[in-house]
């Protein structure tokens, strides 16, 4: 069987400006996607770093202890005044 005849289209009008604009749009879109991915990666890395540095169990315990002491001080300030006068 003979092969079907191939369709060969050659445009009569070529818009160079339009081609450049389409190429530039594609480049900008690729750059925007790459930038968004980088920003997301940096933000995720920053969150992980913060979590690793500032939420270790010992620091969480320290924060809770300071908060409890602060609440006790607000509720019973006279306890702290007496404590400091004893020394």
Image: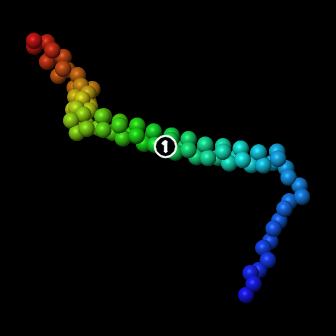
SS label for mark 1: helix
The residue that appears at 35% across and 36% down in the rendered structure is 50
The picture places residue 39, in percent across and down from the top left corner, at 51, 40
User: Label 1: which residue?
Assistant: 40
Residue 75 to residue 34: above or below: above
Examine the image and state in which quarter residue 34 appears.
top right
Q: Residue furthest right?
A: 12
Q: Which of these two is toward me, 12 or 31?
A: 12
Residue, x 61% and y 43% (percent of image)? 31
Q: Percent from the top left, x then y, of residue 4?
A: 77, 80
Residue 22 in the image, given as x and y percentages of width and height: 74, 49
Hey, which residue is sitting farthest left in the picture?
87
> Badge 1 local density, few (<14 within 10 Å), some, or many (20+)?
few
Determine whether 31 is above or below 67 in the image: below
Residue sitting at 86 percent across and 59 percent down?
Answer: 11
Q: Quadrant of the C terminus?
A: top left
The image quadrant that residue 54 belongs to is top left
- For residue 69, what is the image quadrant? top left
Q: Does residue 86 appear to the left or right of 6 in the view shown?
A: left
Please name whichever residue, 69 or 15, is drawn nearer the observer in this view of the structure: 15
Residue furthest toward the front? 2
**Residue 43's spot in the image, x, y percent?**
45, 39
Q: Is residue 29 left or right of residue 1?
A: left
Q: Does residue 68 appear in the picture of this structure?
A: no
């Amino acid at each position: 069987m003979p092969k079907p005849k191939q369709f060969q289209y050659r445009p009569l009008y070529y818009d160079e400006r339009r081609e450049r604009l389409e190429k530039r749009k594609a480049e900008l879109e690729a750059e925007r996607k790459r930038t968004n991915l980088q920003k997301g990666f940096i933000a995720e890395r920053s969150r992980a770093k913060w979590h690793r540095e500032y939420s270790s169990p010992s620091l969480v315990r320290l924060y809770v202890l300071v908060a409890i002491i602060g609440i006790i001080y607000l509720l019973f300030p006279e306890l702290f005044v007496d404590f400091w006068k004893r020394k």
